[in-house]
Amino acid sequence: MMEPRYDPGGVEARWQQTWEAEGLYNADPDPSRTPYVDCHPPPNVTGRLHIGHALNLSVGDLLVRWKRMQGFNVLFQPGFDHAGISTQNVLEKVLIAEGTSRQEIGREAFLERIWSWLHEYGGKIIDDYRKIGASLDYRRERFTMDDAYVRAVMRFFVHLYHRGWIYRANRIINWCPYHETSLSDLELEHEDVDDTLSTIRYPLADGSGHIAIATVRPATIPADVAVAVHPDDERYKHLVGREVIVPWTERRVPIIADDRVELGFGTGALKVTPAHDQKDFDIGRDHGLPEPSALGPDGRVIAEGLEGLTQDEAAKKILDWCKERCLLEKREHYRHSVAFCERCHTRIEPRISLQWWCAMGEIKQRPLQELRSETIEYHPPNQHRFAIDSLENAPDWCISRQIWWGHQIPAWHCADGHITVEETEPDACAECGSTELTRETDVLDTWFSSALWPFATLGWPDDTPDLQQFYPGNVNTTARDIIRLWENRMIFSGLEMMGERPFDDVVIHPTVLAVDGRRMSKSLGNGIDAFEVLDKFGADATRYGLLKNSLTQDVRFSYAAIEEGGRLSNKLWNAARLIVTACEGALPANEPSSLEERWILARLSQAQRAVESYLDDFDFAHSMDELYHVTFDDFCDWYLEAIKSRLYDGDASARATATFALEWLLKLLHPAMPHVTEEIWSFLPAREMRLIVAPWPEAGDTTDADALQRVQELAVMFRRSGVVPPLDGDEKRIFDAVLKPERAKTEGDVDAERERLRGEIARAEKMLANERFVANAPDSVVEAERSKLERYRRELDAISG
RNA sequence: GGGCGGUUAGCUCAGUUGGGAGAGCGCUUCCCUUACACGGAAGAAGUCGCAGGUUCGAGCCCUGCACCGCCCACCA
């Protein structure tokens, strides 16, 4: 029985189970059908659902359900990313809680622990996905560490290597002196700290004076290899090319010019220490400077005469040394942002280290072509420009990580330092034939494997039926912050390995901000718990609210929008309750027999076309808006009010049309609010199939312009005028049922309306009398103004009787 | 510092090539009308951030300014 109040509680879980159990999410290759593939970003295997996922799924599932109803063979692929660093961190914390550590148990045991942990606790997020009603084919769950997937990663690496795009090189990376490992940018946290900026004089080698340099890290002075100034700096121009003496070590180093030096900061002169600073490293490389190190892996000083000291101790010795020689100009307080290891809060040390790199120069060309020619298109368009910019400026990609959890690089070293790269362990060194081989211990950056997601999940490198049916896909829905990390690389890998782009459209949905307009974060305490929202409002309302509010690039989370979704589902539920209880049993289809029936079918048709047009443009918010208004205003407040008494009276035609119109409305709403619509659908007579796979209506030839206009004029006239000219037939019946004559306005209101109309008429007449307007404005605008004038005159006539 | 976006009703936000300022919530008044009070009807409420400019006409286009947010890079 249908209760007066719709409660999503049990309903949603029941349909989620039913749809999945009946195989309605399944995607199986079928050459006779046209595929539609939404490439969905795989979440971290250790993650749980948050609001960002919820929005992403709402968008993807909306598209996928819509296309499924249109008859496409839909693939919505689920799975997980192994998320190298963050998963490793999770397990390290587990080990620490047990009083042991990764180092203590060793690589092999650690990896076993990760696997067994994942077996028990990993992948929970897929159940969260079910809870929001995402119609993924859950049978097809894939993991980037599956054996088959690992094989794909190996194939990709070897391919790139043999194309000459992978190389090893020393570069500067983030180094944690406590863990003695490299860290990605994502593992850092930046914090403002109080520091001291020391200004130190570097004497010119010829004894003609000095150049002053500001530094917060005097301990690195022994590794200075140059002093850099800006080429346009008038103060120092004449010094470029000469030499200075570095304090403490008393080595001579050149003064060089480089435009990466900030003119306005400090003294305008920069000490170049390539081994301990990113910018200095870049400058050093471009000027061919050496890269000596002053610090060891543990962060302690290794420079001559300072061996084993902490940086603070060394700094003090060096500064004292300078002071004695009158080289210390001043020391001042300085507050700046410093990077720390997010796990141990040790200050990060930029450090030169040997890494594997992927050269982007050639790799990015084909993706750039696709983007520039818009064969791959980002939505909204401003993200398209951003994607091109970021690809054009993409630096070489550091693909190695010194962690254990991930795809171990398929490279084998022999004792003579040769490297053999093959998908599986080779018998002997490719160069010297040595059989004493050890495998590279570094693993690949997680995004290296993510880049293969669109086809590695379909069985590549084997040529499978899945691959033939579902590659290339159609659309990729994701968030802005991984355009650089994921999108560009996915596009490249698809073009390179499959010969075709992985999809045509990339939908970048907004970032959901907290209610206060700032980014959700733990430290601000402004986060929204996705589970609380789902429990309180249900999946349909949550989906609707997230989609409804997703117009701009960044959007505040809005409970109001979700509550609106709740009202919409309740309204729909009660409208259905009226129709279901009034129209017992199955009813034959029927031609609409009255104005209001013709009108609602025309309105549904109109709304459908609007929704389709919005969805074609990936404009979800406007499509939700259209659905809300057609449901509330047109279907419920007008149509049902007008038709209600005829339903109760047993009018067969009215009943048939009402049932038909409700079915239509349910279909339009289903992609956004699948559960409530499917539930209502189950109460309708003689259903042969689930709504989820019911055919999307043909809207084409049902528009009835005459009905639309007649009803609209009726509404406008009454609302504006409060007085209606003599009516008969259908118009009179609608008027009596919906507008109700007793609400007619007072004579004073009518006078005011006459005044308003006269004003409008005067304004329109003035515009049309303006020769420049008539000459310059587009014909359609002038014509619209004329018809408005006519309408105002008609309305005025009508209420002036 | 670079890039992107924003500033419209009390709140959250729409406003499609320039052409009669909109929605939802909230508020006021009336109605427990036989689908729904998570409802219905009516209504009040905006110098469209500021200053210029283009135009017959600017929320929309141009210039400058102010403030807010996001991303990236972080000045030794």
Image (cartoon, coloured by chain):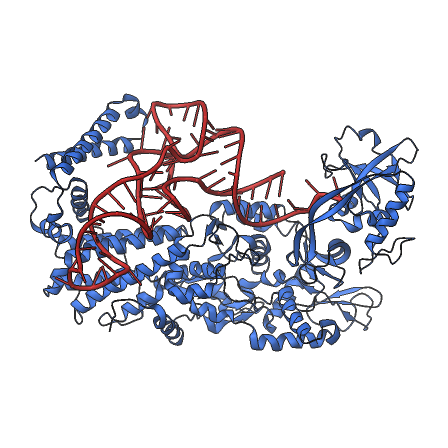
Chain colours: A blue, B red
Residue A253 placement, left or right of A235: right
Q: Quadrant of the C terminus of chain A?
A: top left
On-image quarter of the N terminus of chain A: bottom left
Left or right: A353 in relation to A116: right
Could you say which is closer to the camera, residue A186 or residue A197? A197
Q: On the rendered structure, is A259 left or right of A622? A: right
Q: Residue at x 23, y 72 (%)?
A: A686
Q: Position of residue A634 (x, y in %)?
A: 23, 53
Left-right relation of A170 to A113: right
x, y percent for residue A662: 24, 62
Question: Residue B27, position in %: x, y?
Answer: 30, 48
Q: Is residue B11 above or below residue A521?
A: above
- The answer to whether residue A472 is above or below residue B42 is below
Residue A86: where, in percent of width, then height? 62, 65
The answer to whether residue A701 shows anywhere in this view is no
Residue at 80% of width from left, 47% of height from top? A273
Residue sitting nearer the eye, A690 or A352:
A352
Can see residue A98?
yes
Which residue is nearer to you in this view: A551 or A394? A551
In the rendered picture of this protein, how many numbered marks are placed on residues? 0
